[in-house]
Image: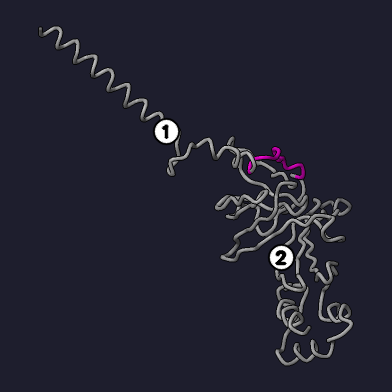
Amino acid sequence: MSRLFLLCFLIMQFLAMDFVCGTCSAGNARGSDGESSQDTIPDNQILYNGRSWLNLYTSVKDDRFLFSKEFLSGSVTMRGKTFSDIRIKYDIFKDEILTPDNQGGILQLNKEMVDSFSLLFRNKRYQFTRITSDSLTGLGGYCNLLYNGRHALYVKYSKKIGKQADDGKFDKFYQINRTYLVKDSIPYPVSGKNDLLKLLSTDKTSIRNFIKKNEITISKEDPESFIPVIRYLDTLR
């Protein structure tokens, strides 16, 4: 009788352990919201859809990135899906976004899939949108959107390589910033008050009076200085 009881007890223990292991396996296959973790794989495939990045300009002084050569906190929206709290660098020499991959390398994101992205630098968030060639002729790629109303204001950042080999020096990256006012779906480069007024067939007197009254200084070194004037322009008509 005791042997039969022992055998039944061992069988019950084995079945109980099998049930617990099966439950744990099922739990590991689900996320915190109870959905299968595999549901997130297509999203990750969108984010990591790109190619490995290599720096082919190691002999050029300085760096090719906007704000910092270190990865910054940011977000990327790809085909309507936003990925927050990721580390990215903006290569303004090639106009590409970079992020660490899962193997310790650097991945260049597929630009054709990117809608927009943001960067956090010195407690300020910069918002970029990708402009296609058929949406705004004369302006394309990633642009910093400063203002969006009846008119829009963008900044396009880029870097070039300055050739200094003739002086026995290393070549060097230098940065170029261009500000664009979008009027009637056409982007116009603006560098100061005079460029702005030239684009206005009317309202020039009102704009001049507004600038003078509010003691506004418009400078190409500070693209955001255009914003109060553009916002006022949108209220005139």
- Report helix, strand or loop for mark 1: helix
Residue at the left extreme, as displayed:
1
| Magenta stretch in the rendered image | 47-57
At x 59% / y 41%, what residue is drawn? 44
Callout 1, which amino acid?
Asn
Magenta segment, principal secondary structure? loop
Quadrant of the image occupied by residue 10: top left
Vertical arrangement, residue 17 with respect to residue 48, above or below: above
Tell me which colouring the rendered structure shows: one colour
Q: Nearer the viewer, mark 2 or mark 1?
A: 1
Name the residue beneath numbered marker 1: 28
Tell me if 29 is positioned left or right of 165 in this view: left
- Report helix, strand or loop for mark 2: strand
At x 78% / y 65%, what residue is drawn? 177
Where is residue 234? Give x, y as percent: 75, 79
Quadrant of the image occupied by residue 39: top right
At x 72% / y 70%, what residue is drawn? 148
Does the magenta portion include 73?
no
27 or 168, which is in the foreground? 27
Which numbered disc, 2 or 1, marks the residue that appears first in the sequence? 1
Name the residue beneath numbered marker 2: 145
